[in-house]
Image (cartoon, rainbow, N blue to C red):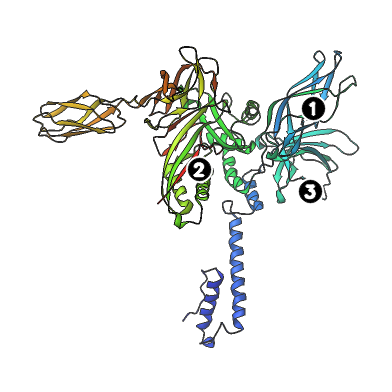
């Protein structure tokens, strides 16, 4: 007899069945038809009530921990305990040289006030407003006022004034009504009272160890509804405000990342010089287009960043400190790589190297990189440690797949299946590549291709080629060291390293359109054989057989006291990339040897094709390829022009490995805008 309820199951159907089983065990309900009675409705209500309560308590328990919390308010509450404030929207910023011209050379000054506006060119049909956040004054030089490297920020400046009432606001908390605020632009002043115009500027407090009882600081927190508020100290950690003080908050309301890449600005206001002359003749030369705009931090990003930020303890010591702090204060960056100078070749001590991949574009401008160093890194870094920001280097993948499929097992047309496979490849790229410390694994990519349509696709074979891009110096002789950083596959006549077309002069002074290509016959043979174990009992010279992917290599062994002393190469052979040694005969046993192949260094040549489509060689020793270390060295060459739209030279060669890792500032990616990056051939079976 069941005299108690089971309480471990929490879904509706199981709860109801447990209730029925419990009641059926009672003598009052023996052979009772629960489904056909009114009692069934009561069981439904009890089961639903139990299920709802179980679900509610489970969700409450989840919200009690940062890892399992789903609600933003819960995650923010947990982050607050760690001293973490989620970042808001971030305004895009640009830098420009701004010249104000006059017809007079009379000495005077002109001031650009805080909030002076500029209008950008249209992005997707929208022009964005940019403003200055600081007042800037310059003195006339000849007839011009020149503002060099003037920073401007996208958004609208707004100001709110609050009169502090101790009775209604004892915690001194003042809400910011706009959810699209860029909190990094907040400026806060406190006026003594409506009758006393003495104004004191408060700054954002970030380090309690540097705050005294009288420090004029304010603190920031995120509230419900993705809005923020500011609050003040308590005369212990930071200065408190007093009854009747007027708090003035000024900040930018911004469109975040929508304004990135804005350029070509025009001023929308007028200026006056110190003599009272109205000025409207402006010349604007953008130095850098708008960048750095970003959206507010998501729940998942807060969960990841808050514990990391807590471990930094407001200082930059370890590599993780740099990565988490930069992401927190410059959210427009997608991925960060940090390494020490001791990892450089040769080592450079006392330096930290940082590479940043922005969410938009491939690179940051030099001005943005310097701003990150000056405003974010240097104030928190260890004294005497210099930070250098390097651009990321991209290793591009070219994916060539042959896919066998049964057209009878799919409703997709050939073009639709090809498109679906492309989407699977791009989804793999999004999930696994495009960031530092990523790793490409060929087998997982092939799984993604095969899983595009598991019924129709029988199997696939994929060849991965690697591509490096660089911008050559034109009309000047220069050498180039192109580092792939991964093992490269030695080419054949039909599959070898190639390049973008470019123009050079041949030995007769005639301009030719040429390419770099790997010399397919630059294979060498077996260079040596090392004896690992001489074996025992040999009475005559054993037969040495060299196996591998080349041919023609021969060797003989020398016997001393029944052991193989050495193996001498008599013919090195050709076209070997791999070779093994087989020892047989001679009456003994146990000998082992290993062959070394010279074919790990290849040759690069410069060729063009004449009017008969025959290959003509201009330089048969233009460079070398180190297949093991993945380095292509191009010797001194003068390039006139490059036949690519962007002016980049592209070197393309097959990878020797199916697993490709990265290091330092290298990012593996796939250029989906390049038509050659994904090639899929469908074969029916």
Image point (82%, 15%), residue name:
143
- Of the residues under marks 3 and 2, which one precedes in the sequence? 3
Image point (46%, 33%), residue name:
466
Q: How many marks?
A: 3
- In the picture of the structure, the residue carrying the numbered disc 1 is 135
Check disc 2: other Cα within 10 Å, few if <14, some if 14-19, many if 20+: some
Query: How far apart are the alpha carbons under marks 3 and 2?
Result: 51 Å
- In the picture of the structure, the residue carrying the numbered disc 2 is 432
Nearer to us: label 2 or label 1: 2
Residue 19 position, x and y percent, is 54, 77
Label 1: element kind: loop
Check disc 3: other Cα within 10 Å, few if <14, some if 14-19, many if 20+: few
Query: How far apart are the alpha carbons under marks 3 and 1?
Result: 35 Å
Instruction: Pick whichever, 508 or 459, lies toward us.
Output: 508
Left or right: 583 as drawn, with respect to 376: left
Instruction: Pick whichever, 596 or 318, lies toward us.
Output: 596
Image point (61%, 67%), residue name:
53
């Amino acid at each position: 007899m069941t005299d108690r309820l089971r309480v471990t199951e929490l879904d509706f159907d199981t709860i109801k069945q447990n209730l029925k089983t419990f009641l059926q065990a009672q003598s009052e309900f023996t052979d009772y038809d629960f489904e056909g009675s009114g009692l069934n409705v009561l069981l439904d209500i009890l089961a639903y009530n139990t299920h709802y309560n179980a679900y509610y308590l489970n969700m409450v328990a989840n919200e009690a921990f940062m890892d399992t919390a789903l609600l933003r308010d819960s995650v923010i509450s947990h982050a607050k305990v760690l001293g973490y404030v989620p970042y808001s929207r971030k305004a895009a910023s640009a830098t420009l040289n701004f010249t104000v011209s006059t017809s007079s050379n009379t000495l005077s000054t002109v001031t650009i006030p805080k909030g002076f506006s500029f209008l950008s060119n249209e992005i997707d049909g929208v022009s964005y407003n940019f403003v200055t956040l600081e007042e800037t004054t310059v003195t006339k030089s000849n007839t011009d006022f020149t503002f060099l490297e003037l920073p401007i920020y996208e958004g609208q400046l707004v100001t709110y004034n609050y009169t502090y009432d101790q009775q209604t606001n004892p915690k001194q908390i003042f809400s910011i009504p706009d959810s699209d605020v860029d909190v990094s632009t907040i400026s806060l002043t406190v006026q003594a009272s409506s009758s006393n115009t003495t104004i004191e500027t408060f700054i954002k407090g970030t380090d309690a160890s540097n705050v005294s009882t009288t420090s004029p600081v304010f603190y920031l927190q995120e509230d419900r509804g993705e809005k923020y508020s500011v609050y003040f100290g308590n005369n212990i950690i930071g200065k408190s405000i007093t009854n009747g003080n007027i708090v003035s908050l000024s900040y930018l309301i911004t469109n975040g990342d929508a304004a990135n890449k804005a350029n070509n600005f025009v001023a929308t206001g007028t200026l006056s010089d110190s003599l009272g002359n109205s000025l409207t003749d402006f010349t604007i030369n953008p130095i850098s287009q708008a960048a750095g705009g970003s959206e507010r931090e998501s729940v998942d990003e807060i969960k990841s960043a808050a514990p990391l930020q807590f471990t930094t303890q407001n200082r930059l010591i370890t590599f993780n400190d740099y990565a988490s702090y930069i992401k927190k204060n410059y959210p427009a960056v997608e991925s960060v790589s940090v390494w020490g100078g001791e990892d450089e070749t040769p080592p450079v001590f006392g330096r930290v190297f940082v590479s940043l991949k922005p969410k938009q574009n491939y690179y940051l401008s030099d001005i943005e990189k310097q701003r990150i160093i000056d405003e974010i890194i240097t104030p928190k870094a260890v004294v005497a440690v210099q930070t250098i920001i390097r651009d990321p280097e991209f290793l591009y993948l070219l994916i060539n797949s042959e896919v066998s499929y049964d057209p009878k097992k799919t409703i997709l047309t050939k073009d639709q299946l090809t498109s679906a496979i492309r989407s699977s490849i791009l989804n793999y790229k999004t999930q696994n590549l495009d960031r530092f410390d990523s790793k490409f694994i060929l087998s997982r990519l092939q799984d993604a291709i095969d899983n595009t349509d598991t019924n129709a696709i029988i199997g696939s074979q994929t060849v991965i080629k690697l591509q490096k891009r660089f911008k050559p110096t034109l009309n000047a002789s220069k050498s180039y060291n192109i580092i792939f950083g991964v093992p490269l596959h030695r080419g054949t006549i039909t599959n070898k390293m190639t390049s973008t077309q470019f123009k050079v002069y041949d030995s007769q002074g005639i301009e030719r359109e040429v390419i770099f290509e790997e010399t397919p016959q630059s294979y060498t043979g077996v260079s040596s054989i090392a004896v690992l174990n001489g074996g025992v009992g040999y009475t005559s010279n054993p037969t040495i057989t060299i196996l591998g992917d080349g041919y023609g290599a021969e060797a003989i062994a020398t016997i001393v006291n029944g052991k193989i002393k050495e193996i001498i190469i008599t013919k090195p052979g050709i076209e070997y990339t791999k070779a093994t040694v087989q020892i047989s005969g001679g009456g003994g046993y146990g000998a082992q040897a290993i062959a070394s192949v010279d074919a790990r260094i290849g040759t690069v040549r410069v060729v063009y094709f004449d009017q008969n489509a025959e290959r003509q060689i201009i330089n048969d020793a233009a460079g070398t390829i180190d297949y093991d270390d993945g380095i292509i060295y191009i010797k001194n060459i003068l390039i006139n022009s490059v036949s690519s739209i962007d002016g980049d030279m592209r070197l393309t060669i097959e990878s020797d490995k199916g697993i490709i890792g990265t290091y330092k500032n290298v990012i593996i990616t796939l250029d989906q805008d390049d038509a050659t990056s994904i090639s899929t051939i469908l074969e029916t079976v």
